[in-house]
Every structure is written in C-alpha cells, then in structure tokens.
C-alpha cells in the first residue's frame, strides 16, 4: 500500500444544498468528481490525526463504490480510525448517533434521501460535524470554496475491504472497523422509549404495518419492531434495502407510499401504519383509514411527550421550520415553553438543541426529531407513536381528533411543482418579492393580508443571519401561504407552496383538507401566477 497524490481540476457546481451535494449518479461517476469533494471536506477540516470518522449511506446505487473511495482517502488524510456500517449502510440518524456515542470528529453520509436511486437515479454526500448534525453553512461554504480551487487529492492505493464482515482492517495506518449498522441506534432507542409497554401492546394483538420502501430503515425496523418489540413477522414490509429502491421513489408520502396507503385504507387494516424514506430520517404516520400530517404529528407528540421515559422531565422548547404549520406553537404556548421558527434545513435546529433551548423539532416534509441526536429520525418518530399508543390505549384517529378539540385544527397542505425550469422558478420568486411591499392590507377573497415578507432568521444562539428563506403571505386570521424553492432536487427546480388555515370550531374539523384550503389555493395562484410561470395547471405532488 502507498498514498498517491493525484492531480485534478475543479468541477463547477459543487456547492452543498439544503442537505449536502446531490447530483445524478452519472455526475458522481465522473473520474475525480467524488474525490474532489471529499478532499475539499478534508482540506477544510485540517489535521485529523488521531481522530475518528464515521462513514455510511443508504445503500443506493454507487454507495459501496463511494464508501471504498472515502475509506482510502480517509487513510491518506491520517485519520486514526474510521467506523463504517456493515455493507456500507448506516441510516442518517444512525450516523448522528454513532458520531455522538463514539466521540467522532464527524461523519460522511452518502445519500440523496428521498430522491430516486439506481444507475439513472440520484446520489448525494454530506458532512456531519462532531455534534452529529449537518455541517453549518459556514463549513459548507468553506468546502464549496475549496472545490473551486482544488488542484490535487490524496488517496491510498489499497485494495477494497470486505464491507460485509464485522471487524477491523487496516488501510495504511488507519484502523477501519466495520460495525453493526443497527446496534448503537437500537441501544439509544431503548433508553428513550418504554419497550415493555410496546411489547405488551403487540402481545395483546395490536397490528402494525411498517413500509421500509426498500430503503435503509428496513433493517432498523426489522431489528427493533419485529426483533426487540416482538411484532409478528411480516409487520415490516419492503424491508430489504435495494440499490434502486425497487424502482420506487423512497419518499414517505401518500403518493409514493401508495402500497401502505392501500393497506391502511382496507376494511381489515392494521391499527397503525408507518413508513420511512431512503436514508431513514423521514416518517409518515397513519391510522386505520386516517393519515396524520407531519405538522400534526409533531404537535401531538409534543403534547404527550412525557409518556416516553426519555422525555418524562418535560420539554425545554419546540422548534419547527417556518413552512411547517403553527400547530406545535399552540402546544408550546399551553406548556409555557418557547416555540422557535427556523428556516428549512435540520442544521438550523442544531444550535437550539446544543444550547438546550429545544427538545423536539419538526419539518413539514415528514421530518421529526429531538435532542437525542442532531438529525431528524424516522424510526424514532414511529417508536414515539407506538409508545403513545401503548400508554393511552387510544387509536391514532382518537388521539389526533382529541388534539384538535383541545387546540383547534391547523388545516395544512404542501403543493409541489417538481422539475420546473430553473429560470422560470427563479423569476416567479423574484416577481413575488417585488409584490411584497404592496400586499399588506389587501383584500384577497375572504381574507385580508396582515403582512407579507421574505422570511429572515437570526439565530438566537450565535447571531448568524439567514435571508430569503421563503416568501410568506400571512392573513389577519393567521392563515398563511408560503412559497419557496426546494434545495433537495437534482433536476430543474421544485416550487413548494404551503397552505395553512386555522379552525377552532370542532364542527369544522373533519372537512377534506383540499376543500378547506381551496380559497387559499386560488389566492396562491392569483398572486404568484404559478400556471403562467411554470406551465403547470396542477402540482406534481400534493401532501
């Protein structure tokens, strides 16, 4: 073995987005492309002698090849130790867990999350820092600047290691340990939740269906739900991670998790349904013929948090991304704790969690988590719901309906316009920003605009400022329309339109969501001219 120094030239466009660098697999397969980015990460970090690195991914196509490259580069950079998940697999929450438990300097996550996989699909990479969370913008910008100037990278010429065999191998002077992908994470879950109560729930005949979507959470759900908790075999479906996710889109929403939706809509449906996404950090929660919005899920868990042993002392605060509905804010007010509103992106929750200002966090895009790690966590959310169901003896629908009766209902929906021509999407947002100053006080249908702005966030911990985080139109009765462009796609732009209406009267808590929001849908089209800019009469996905 020897360490090689390889000459290279920069690739354009290696700036990390909301959750790292995401491109088509074919882009990452270009010679030097992955190596350039990884070397830029290591150059930004500086001397890593004596340090530990965690490496793992969601098992999608190109994952194993990329893992081997990173191991050889980590050895060339002088890491003392690298922990890699068996088979190259670690869920994003598990990477965060292992970083924190093992005292690692950080970790590299290989995933494009909920994006499609396979040779023609997407691939992604991001760096997580020593708290287990995604690198903050200061770090990602430094990495990007380095990608623009890189001239060489260092890599060992060692042979590939056996990723399937647990144990220690050496590459140069670096100790590479293949670890059980589930063990550390499962141990943490047992500290947070009442596994005895959940076991008793399943022993009493409770039925569940967890859809692993042929993605990374399948092995975690099998080991914990069927293994440690004693759910019947077959409770977890689509449990084996596949490089192309079985040809499906591993995004746990009513469109892409159609198989689970059909199971939960049947007359003989299980009591509880759940799904997670490509890298295991998102979740979808379902009752029998009843689905729970991510915003309501966060609010319900916050209202009942003390049923779980890990949260018995109560919550320090609740944080949500700005586009997420205000349902959790009402719970925070009732509990007398702070409610924080941040930009989209889990990295914005990191400072709040580290400073002890928040305990539970949530994003409307099916992401929920807490201070146990520094990522959102799909399996954790499912276990929290199981703990709540076991403690209450109530159904999912009962719990949510009772929540609405107590706090009121925030009708909420997200309309996604995917793969929009980038220039058109940017022009739509620019035209909205021009209109902001004139919207205040306008009558729009049955609504009057209270204020309109482009959301700006000042971090209460470090004072950093994030600008242009989404255009908000807020009505005098609290209803909202939010427009923003997503940073997680790889083709064109995704325009996301968020719609929210608060309803206090229980008599109006069971309207079809799109019907309840229809006046706001019309206003959104009227103000933004979505059809004119995008050429789309309807959203690609409605959740």
Image (cartoon, grey):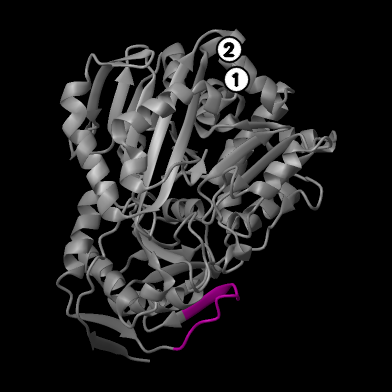
- Residues packed near mark 1 inside 10 Å, few (<14), some (14 to 19) or many (20 plus): few
Q: Main secondary structure of the magenta part?
A: loop
* Relative vertical location of residue 251 with respect to residue 507 in this rendering, above or below: below
Please report contact status of discs 1 and 2: CB closer than 8 Å, yes or no: yes
- The image's mark for residue 254 is none
Res. 508 mark: 2
The answer to whether residue 510 shows anywhere in this view is yes
- The percent coordinates of residue 190 (x first, y second) are 62, 42
Residue 198 forms part of the magenta stretch: no
Does residue 78 appear to the left or right of 66 in the view shown?
Answer: left
Residue depicted at x 70% and y 49%: 259
Secondary structure type for disc 1: loop
Q: Position of residue 504 (x, y in %)?
A: 51, 9
Q: Can you identify the residue that label 1 sits on?
A: 511
278 to the left or right of 130: right
| Quadrant of the rendering where the N terminus is positioned | bottom left
Which stretch appears magenta?
159-169
Q: Nearer the viewer, residue 9 or 509?
A: 509
């Amino acid at each position: 073995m020897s360490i090689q120094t390889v000459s290279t030239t920069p690739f354009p466009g290696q700036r990390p987005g909301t959750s790292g660098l995401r491109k088509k697999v074919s882009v990452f397969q270009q010679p030097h492309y992955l190596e350039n980015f990884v070397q830029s990460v290591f150059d930004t970090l500086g001397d890593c002698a004596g340090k530990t690195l965690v490496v793992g991914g969601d098992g999608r196509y190109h994952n194993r090849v990329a893992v081997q490259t990173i191991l050889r580069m980590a050895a060339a950079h002088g890491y003392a130790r690298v922990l890699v998940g068996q088979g190259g697999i670690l869920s994003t929450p598990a990477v965060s867990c292992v970083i924190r438990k093992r005292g690692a300097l950080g970790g590299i996550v290989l995933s494009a999350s909920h994006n499609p996989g396979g040779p023609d699909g997407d691939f992604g990479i991001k760096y997580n820092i020593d708290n287990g969370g995604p690198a903050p913008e200061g770090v990602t910008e430094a990495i990007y600047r380095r990608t623009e100037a890189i001239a060489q990278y260092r890599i060992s010429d060692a042979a590939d290691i056996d990723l399937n065999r647990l144990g220690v191998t050496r590459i140069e002077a670096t100790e590479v340990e293949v670890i059980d992908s589930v063990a550390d994470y499962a141990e943490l879950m047992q500290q947070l939740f009442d596994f005895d109560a959940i076991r008793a729930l399943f022993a009493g005949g409770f039925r569940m269906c967890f859809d692993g979507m042929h993605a990374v959470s399948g092995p975690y759900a099998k080991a914990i739900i069927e293994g440690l908790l004693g759910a019947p075999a077959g409770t977890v479906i689509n449990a084996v991670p596949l490089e192309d996710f079985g040809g499906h889109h591993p995004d746990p929403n009513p469109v892409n998790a159609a198989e689970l939706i059909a199971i939960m809509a049947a007359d003989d449906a299980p009591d509880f349904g759940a799904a997670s996404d490509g890298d295991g950090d998102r979740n979808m929660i379902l009752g029998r013929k009843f689905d729970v919005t991510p915003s309501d899920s966060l609010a319900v868990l916050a209202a009942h948090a003390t049923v779980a042993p890990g949260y018995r002392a109560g919550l320090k605060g609740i944080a949500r991304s700005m586009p997420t509905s205000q349902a959790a804010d009402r719970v925070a007010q009732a509990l007398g704790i702070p409610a924080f509103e941040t930009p989209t992106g889990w990295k914005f929750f990191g400072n709040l969690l580290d400073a002890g200002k928040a305990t539970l966090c949530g994003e409307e895009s099916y992401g929920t988590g807490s201070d146990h790690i520094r990522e959102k966590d799909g399996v954790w959310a499912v276990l929290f719901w199981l703990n709540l169901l076991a403690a209450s003896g109530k159904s999912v629908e009962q719990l949510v309906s009772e929540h609405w009766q107590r706090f009121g209902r925030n009708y909420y929906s997200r309309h996604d316009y995917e793969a929009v021509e980038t220039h058109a999407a940017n022009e739509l947002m620019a035209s909205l920003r021009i209109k902001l100053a004139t919207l205040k006080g306008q009558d729009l249908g049955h609504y009057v605009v209270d204020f309109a702005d482009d959301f700006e966030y000042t971090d209460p911990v470090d004072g950093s400022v994030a600008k242009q985080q989404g255009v908000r139109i807020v009505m005098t009765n609290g209803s909202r329309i939010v427009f923003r462009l997503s940073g997680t796609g790889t083709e064109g732009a995704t325009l996301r339109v968020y719609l929210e209406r608060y309803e206090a009267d229980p008599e109006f808590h069971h309207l079809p969501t799109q019907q309840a929001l229809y006046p706001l849908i019309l206003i959104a089209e009227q103000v933004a001219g979505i059809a004119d800019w995008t050429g789309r009469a309807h959203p690609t996905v409605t959740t």
